[in-house]
Image: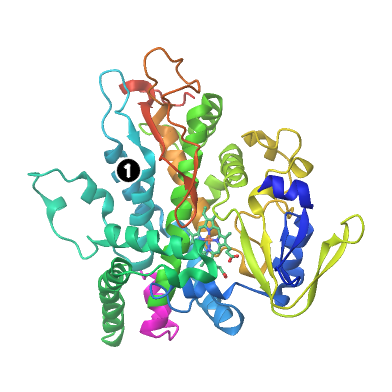
Amino acid sequence: MARKYAENGSTHAVYSSLGAQKGICTIEPENFKAVYSTHFNDWERPKYRAAAARPFMGPGIFTSDGPAWSHARAMLRPQFERQNLEANFPVLERHVEFLFQAIGEPGWDGWTRVLNLQDVFYRFSMDSSTEFLFGTSAGSQSASLQTPGAGGDLLRPTPMMNFESAFGKVAKHVSVRLKLGKWYWMWDNLEYRRACRDMYAMTDPFIASAFKNRSQDHKTSKAPTIIDALIASGASHDFIRNQCMHLIIAGLETTAALLCWTFAQLELRPDVVTTLRREIIATFGTEECPTQQFTFEKLKSCNYLQWTLLEVLRLYPALPVNARVAVRNTVLPVGGGPDGRGPIAVKKGARVALGTYLTQRDEKWWGKDAGVFMPERWEGRRKGGWEFVPFSRGPQVCVGQQYSLNQASYVVARMMQRYELFEQLVPAGLVSGGEGKGRQDNLKKGWKTVFTPRDGVRMRLKVAGCGVTNCGEG
Ligand code: HEM
């Protein structure tokens, strides 16, 4: 892809065999700004996106434009306000406890077994986001901890116990359909249709019961969920179901992928782990001797933690290429004229591909070391530049941005309190921590519904202090 831009310029048109302009490919931040913000009304999402996601998702925030989009956005935005994120910390902690259980106890030397953190983060994200949405967790972490013959609460069937399997199938099919673009209809089968039905069968009862509770004016001790809030604003059952599915598809794998890429990098960079641990322990204390409660503000004030996540989002944006279609004849500010620096005309119906991944790695904006993972580069750097758009920008900026960053910050901080080293087990004869034959590449790129490590993120983890209390030490 980088070669295509090197040969044809940072903004270039693509033509059909009959010579008509089919679309524009761009990695120019000025053009991102025009599409996402200053000329927002000249653009819409490609229609195939909504069609490819059907029947799993009906019309909703992630695939709509115009009045339908602004209505959905106005209804959902308040659910992601600060007070709701603050209220969500106990839920996060409960799921982090499950995550630690899934990682397992360390051996005599303080090291855990080797495991695939991708599975653990994926389940964490699934459980915490379903609880945030429906008030009931998918419980995939506790289900995965069940061993045959184990007794107790963990074996009790839960209303969401098939969520992981159904969502896994839905995500697999939707990602193929999205990749096929306007040819999405070629990928359809019974497994996909059944998984969609299973998803509704699991989630519809939550919506129905929230309606029932409301009509009976039944007060429960549970905190209101997004569904309760949508009902209170007059939304219908179908509208709520659709928005819930949109939030699941938009939010679940994105946060899991952010955590995966972060730990894939941390495993290679013990120096970053040391700095991160120092900051987290100075702010919140150790696990044994906590000094402060976690809050949204305090996590935000941990600069190095925030820089680390920004740096991961820079190198591994969940959506490496975004797309829009011109709804009228319009212009992009950069890409035309003899030197390619003047405006370029775009025909109504032409599609623009916005190359987030390449822009966020372009030496022009990030310097010679653009490809290097370096959280320190964010020190004093303005976040508002259009060369950094992992959550998109403008009116359709990701509605879950703060929710996701808060969730990821919390997981990283708790992991830093508990673990001090991350390491891949290297076959005998190879240097520990070095790249070599036989060592899995945790940074190999792959695709689910979002950009994610292809072969998982395998490593073992060393518990901090190995049973020795280390209050206040980094
Ligand atoms: C690392 C985490 C995340 C990343 C990188 C990310 C990225 C993005 C991007 C690039 C878009 C723009 C899509 C477009 O232009 O068509 C977007 C939109 C959106 N995201 Fe996220 N997202 C993340 C997490 C979440 C979470 C956790 C949720 C919800 C629980 C969420 C909900 C949404 C929704 C509803 C939209 C559509 C907003 C609108 O059109 O008004 N995202 N996200």
- Residue stretch rendered in magenta on the structure: 223-240
In the rendered image, residue 234, in percent from the top left (x then y), is placed at: 43, 86
Residue 94 sits inside the magenta stretch: no
Amino acid type at image mark 1: Leu
Q: On the image, numbered disc 1 is attached to which residue?
A: 99
> Which image quarter: residue 305?
top right
Residue in front for this viewpoint, 235 or 345: 345
Please tell me which residue is depicted at 15% across the width and 60% down the height of the picture. 157
- Give left or right: position of 7 versus 432: right
**Above or below: residue 348 compared with residue 433:** below
Residue in front for this viewpoint, 154 or 315: 315
Residue 238 sits inside the magenta stretch: yes
Please tell me which residue is depicted at 25% across the width and 19% down the height of the picture. 108
Residue in front for this viewpoint, 148 or 25: 25
Tell me the chief SS of the magenta region: helix
In the rendered image, residue 168, in percent from the top left (x then y), is placed at: 33, 58
Badge 1, how many Cα within 10 Å: few under 14, some, many 20+?
Answer: many
- Give left or right: position of 219 versus 245: left
**Above or below: residue 164 compared with residue 468:** below
Residue 226 seen anywhere in this rendered image of the structure:
yes
